[in-house]
Amino acid sequence: MDYQKAAEEFRGDFRRLHDEIAKVIVGAEPIIDGVLTCLFAGGHCLLEGVPGLGKTLLVRTLSQALSLQFSRIQFTPDLMPADIIGTNIIAEDDAGNREFRFRQGPIFANIVLADEINRATPKTQSALLEAMQEHTVSVARTIHRLEEPFFVMATQNPIEMEGTYTLPEAQLDRFFYKLLVDYPSAENLTSILERTTQRHMPHGEPVMDAARIEHWQGLVRDVPAAPQVTNYAVRLVLATQPGNELSTGMVTKYARFGSSPRGAQALLLGGKVNALRAGRFNVSFDDIKDSAASALRHRVLLNFEAEADGITSDDIIRDLLNNVETAAKVA
């Protein structure tokens, strides 16, 4: 295989898919890029932002631009695990014989939107854990495999606390990226009004199918990373852990827990996608740095002192990028 040519083809497909989504979603290029990075890296994405910023519209537009099965789950406090994964029901055939049959839940789709995921109880949230990690669903001792590609996008509101449940650390860790959706600028808001207040609203057209996505997911994992680049990702993750010899003073003061090994995987795989987006078949230090905030912000858990001082996970990650050297080695 001509890997350099493949990288250029990936770059073109990525741009076409990005542009198709951008026909509907205005002024959110970094968010679109982050979502597509998760898709091609084979991970899941958590979108956080106040209502009305187009999070759900982004997911729906992505499903329109891909020839994949789409399913939406509206999370509410009374939602049960069986409402997500499905359940066994008693079915009767023409002869009157009864048997249990599994009725699939909405999790059986290629793209699953978990809307307002923090409104459901931890019991219901946990129904996603196996599906997100193993791409399987276990019901009554039977394992059902989900169809590939399988991609979960979840949304949550960061400001509304009543009737919400904080996502458990195990749930957060299964999201490849956490993306923060911000308010649009005045220029972008004007464009939004022009597109959404007329008779004909834009919508995405299919530009890619499942086979093409799986092809690119395989290519992403073929991208080589030099030992020093992998070493840099390792040191960034180790530096997030309080008490580690690589951690900075800011981490020691404000972090309660650091990133798991999944954070290092997200850094490296995200860096590989970034390299292909640039038409390169090798990962650079900058590719890792560009993935750092999205890959680590939900994996660095803060203490009460950080909240009192107004320190965020992004502040700590910026401090790490400024202080963790690219050329050093793990002790």
Image: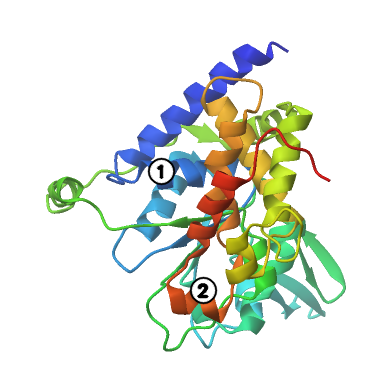
Residue 140 as seen in the image, left or right of residue 32 = right
Residue 181 pos. (x, y %): 38, 57
At 68% across and 57% down in the image, what residue appears?
247
Residue 237 pos. (x, y %): 70, 52
Residue 40 pos. (x, y %): 60, 39
Q: Nearer the viewer, mark 2 or mark 1?
A: 2
Q: Quadrant of the N terminus?
A: top right
242 or 58: nearer the eye? 242
* Residue 294 in view (yes/no): no
At 54% across and 81% down in the image, what residue appears?
304
Residue 241 pos. (x, y %): 71, 62
Q: Which residue is mark 1?
A: 30
Q: CA distance from mark 2 to mark 1?
A: 27 Å
Q: Which residue is mark 2?
A: 306
- Which label's residue is closer to the chain start, 2 or 1? 1
Q: Is 214 above or below relative to 171?
A: above
**Chosen colour scheme:** rainbow
The disc labelled 2 sits on which kind of residue?
Answer: Ala
